[in-house]
Image (tube, rainbow, N blue to C red):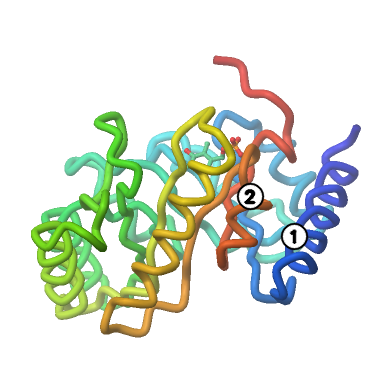
């Protein structure tokens, strides 16, 4: 299967998930996650019509983005989806159009200062750890509807981050537990949708769903899905 064929299949599954759940496919943005993929594969995805590409490591992105931008047949919107170490934050604002993975107030403050220095707005999403796994980054969101402390902390983080100059808070991002049963994954995504709706802020974007679970994420209200392997095949390592 070629990259173009794979993209076609992903679009078909998006359409089916939308039809099952009463969503419009135009509400769902497909972000092709190109980590560990060579520039040639990225250009093939752009040639097949994708304009939204995502990377998870700053160094790798800094290496590939200028090359892809120079050779791409149409402009690319770049998404940062991985954890950002403090000392790499400086490189993020000039490279990316949307950061999905703001996982601490400190990082948000740093990105805000860097965006101010560039005199450019930086759109961001807050990464929420809804499943409560210790291995995951993000603001604590496990059991938020029952746990008053978790809820208070989330509310405070959202209002503090909304107040930061030049940072434009557009929504929330999460990852489901790897290899979990469908019912568990669905609950994580449904919790995330409910959290977004309960926050007293206009947060249009909900970034959730990867190769193994994007149809469930769409059924539960995802507006952005981040898909790698279903488009490019298995990664090595
Ligand atoms: C790698 C990655 C993806 C894509 O994962 P696939 O399983 O290849 O679809 C999505 N989101 C994040 C944050 C990732 O690191």
The residue where tag 1 is placed is 17
Q: Nearer the viewer, residue 156 or 233?
A: 156
Residue depicted at x 90% and y 43%: 5
Question: Where is the N terminus found, in terms of image quarters?
Answer: top right
Identify which residue is drawn at 65% across, 40% down.
211
x, y percentage for residue 72?
A: 71, 55
Q: Would you say the beta carbon of the disc 2 residue lies within 8 angstroms of ligand 1?
A: yes
Circles 1 and 2, Cβ within 8 Å, touching? The answer is yes
**Residue closer to the observer: 214 or 78:** 214
Horizontal and vertical percent position of residue 171:
39, 70
Q: Hey, which residue is sitting farthest top in the picture? A: 237
Element carrying mark 2: helix
> Which structural element holds mark 1?
helix
Left or right: 158 in relation to 201: left
Specify whether 173 is left or right of 76.
Answer: left
Residue 164 occupies which quadrant of the picture?
bottom left
Could you tell me residue 15's position as x and y percent? 81, 63
How many marks can you see? 2
Classify mark 1: residues with Cα within 10 Å, few (<14), some (14-19) or many (20+).
Answer: many
Residue at 44% in and 45% down? 175
Q: Quadrant of the C terminus?
A: top right
Residue under label 2: 214
């Amino acid at each position: 299967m070629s990259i173009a064929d794979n993209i076609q299949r992903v679009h078909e599954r998006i359409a089916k998930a939308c039809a099952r759940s009463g969503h419009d496919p135009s509400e769902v943005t497909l972000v092709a996650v190109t980590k560990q993929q060579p520039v040639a594969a990225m250009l093939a995805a752009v040639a097949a019509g994708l304009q939204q590409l995502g990377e998870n490591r700053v160094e790798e992105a800094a290496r590939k983005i200028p090359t892809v931008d120079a050779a791409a047949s149409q402009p690319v919107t770049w998404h940062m989806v991985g954890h950002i170490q403090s000392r790499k934050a400086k490189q993020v604002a000039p490279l990316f159009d949307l950061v999905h993975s703001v996982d601490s107030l400190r990082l948000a403050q740093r990105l805000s200062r860097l965006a101010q220095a560039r005199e450019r707005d930086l759109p961001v999403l807050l990464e929420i750890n809804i499943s409560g796994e210790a291995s995951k980054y993000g603001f604590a969101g496990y059991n938020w509807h029952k746990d008053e402390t978790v809820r208070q902390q989330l509310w405070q983080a959202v209002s503090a981050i909304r107040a930061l100059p030049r940072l434009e808070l557009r929504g929330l991002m999460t990852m489901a537990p790897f290899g979990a049963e469908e019912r568990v994954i669905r609950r994580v995504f449904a919790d995330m949708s409910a959290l977004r709706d309960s926050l007293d802020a206009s947060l249009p974007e909900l970034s959730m769903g990867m190769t193994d679970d994007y149809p469930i994420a769409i059924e539960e209200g995802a507006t952005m899905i981040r898909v790698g392997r279903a488009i490019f095949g298995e990664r090595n390592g």
